């Protein structure tokens, strides 16, 4: 088994473990950081064409443009850039643990988006932003931390979870599990999207009564 395949299997094990028991993240976090730092130089080349197709369909379905959006586990920045291009007035923040990924994202940032897109290192389990800071919290192939998503989103804001190869994505959470965890935290208006191999789920955080 080669290094890439081992990494894919580790990512699936880590995802299943952390979704069930978020406290285990502290054990998996340093290994995941090293893994993605090592992958950064070739990350864009190994991504499949159209890997954000369902992610972008979900962006199209948002009922109103987000004023401020967060792309969690942004990697080399494709998700954050997709949001910024779709919503020309939005401020977009991309966060990731892997500094090498972020360095590549900053290199890719075009001058016309530099004023409203920023990339910074942060742990998805504890993003250093105040409560209710964002109208959209998006994930592409990322382990979800549901309590943190609910904390960061403004009432009426949306959470987006996308997977570039559907159930075959190494970091994958089934939609029924996503729905159940989000519903516990007051999310509703679930919508599913698929395009080719890609899938996505969109959910809205409840507004005050």
Image (cartoon, rainbow, N blue to C red):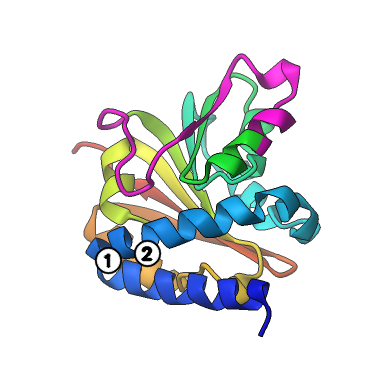
What residue does disc 1 label? 24
Q: Identify the residue at horizontal 44%, vertical 77% (top origin).
A: 13
**Closer to the camera, 66 or 133?**
133
Q: Is residue 108 magenta?
A: yes
Question: Which residue reaches farthest bottom?
Answer: 1
For the record, the magenta segment spans: 104-132
The image quarter in which residue 16 lies: bottom left
**Secondary structure type for disc 2:** helix
Q: Residue 99's spot in the image, x, y percent?
A: 53, 40
Can the viewer see residue 4?
yes
Q: Nearer the viewer, residue 124 or 130?
A: 124
* Residue 57: image location, x then y, percent: 65, 50
Q: Is residue 197 left or right of residue 9?
A: right
- Which residue does the numbered mark 2 point to in the structure image? 28
Q: Is residue 195 left or right of residue 89?
A: right
Q: How far from the left and from the top, in percent, is residue 24?
A: 27, 66
At 39% from the left and 38% from the top, the residue drawn is 157
């Amino acid at each position: 088994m080669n290094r890439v395949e081992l990494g894919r299997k580790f990512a699936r094990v880590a995802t299943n473990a952390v979704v069930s028991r978020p406290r285990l993240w502290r054990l998996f976090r340093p290994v995941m950081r090293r893994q993605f730092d090592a992958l950064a130089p070739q990350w864009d080349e190994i991504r499949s064409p159209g890997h954000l197709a369902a992610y972008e369909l979900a962006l199209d379905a948002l009922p109103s443009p987000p004023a401020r959006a967060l792309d969690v586990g942004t990697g080399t920045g494709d998700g954050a850039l997709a949001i910024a291009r779709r919503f020309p007035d939005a401020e977009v923040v991309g966060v990731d643990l892997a500094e090498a990924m972020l360095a590549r994202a900053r290199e890719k940032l075009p001058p016309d988006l530099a004023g409203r897109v920023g990339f910074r290192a942060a742990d998805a389990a504890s993003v250093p932003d105040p409560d209710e800071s964002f109208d959209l919290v998006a994930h592409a192939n990322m382990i979800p931390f549901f309590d943190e998503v609910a904390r960061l989103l403004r009432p009426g804001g949306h959470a987006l979870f996308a997977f570039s190869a559907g159930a075959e994505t190494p970091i994958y959470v089934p939609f029924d599990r996503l729905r159940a965890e989000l519903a516990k935290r007051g999310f509703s208006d679930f919508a599913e999207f698929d395009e080719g191999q890609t899938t996505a789920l969109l959910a809205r955080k409840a507004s005050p009564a």
